[in-house]
Image (cartoon, rainbow, N blue to C red):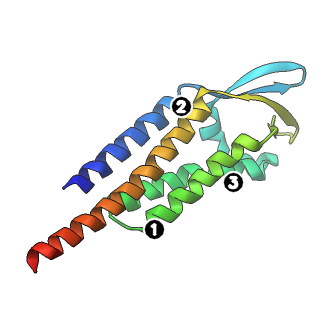
Amino acid sequence: MESERIKSITINISLLLFFISLTQNAVKIYYHGECLYSSSISYLLSGGIAFFGGGLLEQIIWFANPLSLIAIIMLQRNDRKAIVLICIALLLAISFSFWTEILGSESGSQAKILSLQLGYFLWVASIITLTIGTFLFFIIEKKELKEEENRIL
């Protein structure tokens, strides 16, 4: 079945892009007179507890990661709810590109975002890949089911 092949390719490419993104810097920031690069892996590891340092919005953006993971699990199970989850994850991930500041430390002080780096773009590409592949899977699966139905009749 072509739909199963698309599902497999989608998940594998999406995860590959995600894991590669973790080896890269996510953003370049200006904090206390210094230009600093922040790694993607540090955001992944600390993003889940960002609200403890006053980073509620950062926590919300980070939530795109578990939503993507749940969408992958639902896609594996052919559950159409994966479409909703991955679309929400994509909106969250893209919305970060409009930010001008980010939590600079646990004290709640802000750092100016100077630029987005390769890690961010690979992360978003991972979610875009998963979004497109999820839509393609369900479109092709529906077409395959109709063809199978027509063969039976």
Q: Describe the element under mark 3 as helix, strand or loop.
A: helix
Q: Is residue 2 left or right of residue 113?
A: left
Which residue position holds label 1? 81
**CB-based contact (under 8 Å), mark 3 and mark 2:** no
The kind of residue on which mark 2 rests is Leu
Q: How many marks?
A: 3
Q: Residue at x 88, y 38 (%)?
A: 109
Can residue 67 be seen at all in this image of the molecule? Answer: yes
Which of the pair 103/16 is nearer the observer? 16
Q: Residues within 10 Å of mark 3 (few under 14, many from 20)?
A: some
Q: Residue furthest top?
A: 34
Q: Describe the element under mark 2 as helix, strand or loop.
A: loop
Which residue position holds label 2? 22
Q: Residue at x 57, y 25 (%)?
A: 24
Which of the pair 102/41 is nearer the observer? 102
Q: Which mark is residue 60?
A: 3
Q: Residue at x 10, y 73 (%)?
A: 151
The kind of residue on which mark 3 rests is Ile
The kind of residue on which mark 1 rests is Lys
Q: State how far apart marks 1 and 3 are (Cα).
A: 20 Å
